[in-house]
C-alpha cells in the first residue's frame, strides 16, 4: 500500500478534496479525492477506491484502485487492483492486473535498458546450422 520514504515527504489528497490543475510532486502521492489535471510524480502514485483522476499521470510507481481517465506512464511497476478503472493508454516496465480490473486502451511494456540493448543484439536464426 502507501509507504513513506524516509527522505521524501508524502502528500495526501483527501476524499473531500477536489484539485483542478496540474500536480508536480517529488515524493509519493495518495489520492482519495478527485484530480482534474495532469500528475507528474517522482515516487509512488496511489489512487484509492472511488478516487477519480482526469488527466495524464507520469510516475515512477503506480498502485491504482480508483478511476483514471487519461494515459498512465509508469517508469517501473504499475498495479491495477480489482476496483481500478483505466480509460487510457498504459506504458510500464512491470504490470500487475488483478482479476476484475477494467482497462480500456493500449498497453506497451518497455524498459529503457531493454530498448537500447535490443537493437544491438543478434536474434538467433532458426535456419542457422541446418542444411
Image (cartoon, rainbow, N blue to C red):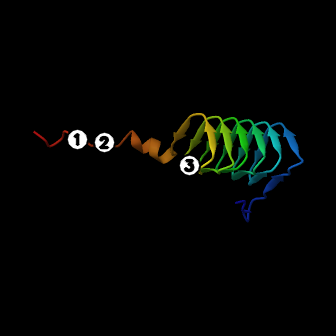
Residue at the disc numbered 2: 122
Dot 1 alpha-carbon crowd within 10 angstroms: few under 14, some 14 to 19, many 20 or more: few
Q: Is mark 1 in CB contact (under 8 Å) with mark 3?
A: no
Element class at badge 3: strand
C-alpha gap between disc 1 and disc 2: 12 Å
How far from the left and from the top, in percent, is residue 125?
24, 40
How far from the left and from the top, in percent, is residue 16?
89, 48
- Closer to the camera: disc 1 or disc 2? 1
C-alpha gap between disc 1 and disc 3: 30 Å
Q: In the rendered view, would you say 95 is above or below 69?
A: below
Residue at (41% x, 44% y) in the render: 117
C-alpha gap between disc 2 and disc 3: 27 Å
Give left or right: position of 128 versus 55: left
Look at the image and tell me in which quarter the C terminus lies.
top left
Element class at badge 2: loop
Residue at (19% x, 39% y) in the render: 127
Element class at badge 1: loop
Residue at the disc numbered 1: 126
Residue at the disc numbered 3: 95
Residue at (58% x, 40% y) in the render: 91
Dot 3 alpha-carbon crowd within 10 angstroms: few under 14, some 14 to 19, many 20 or more: some
How far from the left and from the top, in percent, is residue 122?
31, 42
Quadrant housing residue 8? bottom right
Look at the image and tell me in which quarter the N terminus lies.
bottom right
| Lower position in the chain sequence, tag 2 or tag 3 | 3
Seen as rendered, the residue at the extreme left is 131
**Residue closest to the eye, 70 or 103:** 103
Q: Which label was assigned to residue 62? A: none
Give left or right: position of 83 versus 123: right
Amino acid at each position: 500500500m502507501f509507504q513513506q520514504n524516509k527522505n521524501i515527504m508524502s502528500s495526501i489528497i483527501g476524499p473531500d478534496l477536489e484539485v483542478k490543475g496540474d500536480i508536480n510532486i517529488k515524493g509519493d502521492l495518495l489520492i482519495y479525492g478527485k484530480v482534474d489535471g495532469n500528475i507528474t510524480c517522482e515516487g509512488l502514485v496511489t489512487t484509492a477506491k472511488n478516487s477519480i483522476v482526469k488527466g495524464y499521470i507520469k510516475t515512477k510507481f503506480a498502485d491504482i484502485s480508483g478511476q483514471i481517465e487519461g494515459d498512465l506512464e509508469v517508469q517501473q511497476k504499475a498495479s491495477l487492483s480489482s476496483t481500478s478503472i483505466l480509460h487510457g493508454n498504459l506504458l510500464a516496465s512491470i504490470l500487475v492486473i488483478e482479476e476484475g480490473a477494467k482497462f480500456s486502451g493500449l498497453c506497451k511494456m518497455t524498459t529503457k535498458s531493454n530498448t537500447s540493448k535490443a537493437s544491438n543484439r543478434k536474434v538467433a536464426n532458426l535456419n542457422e546450422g541446418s542444411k
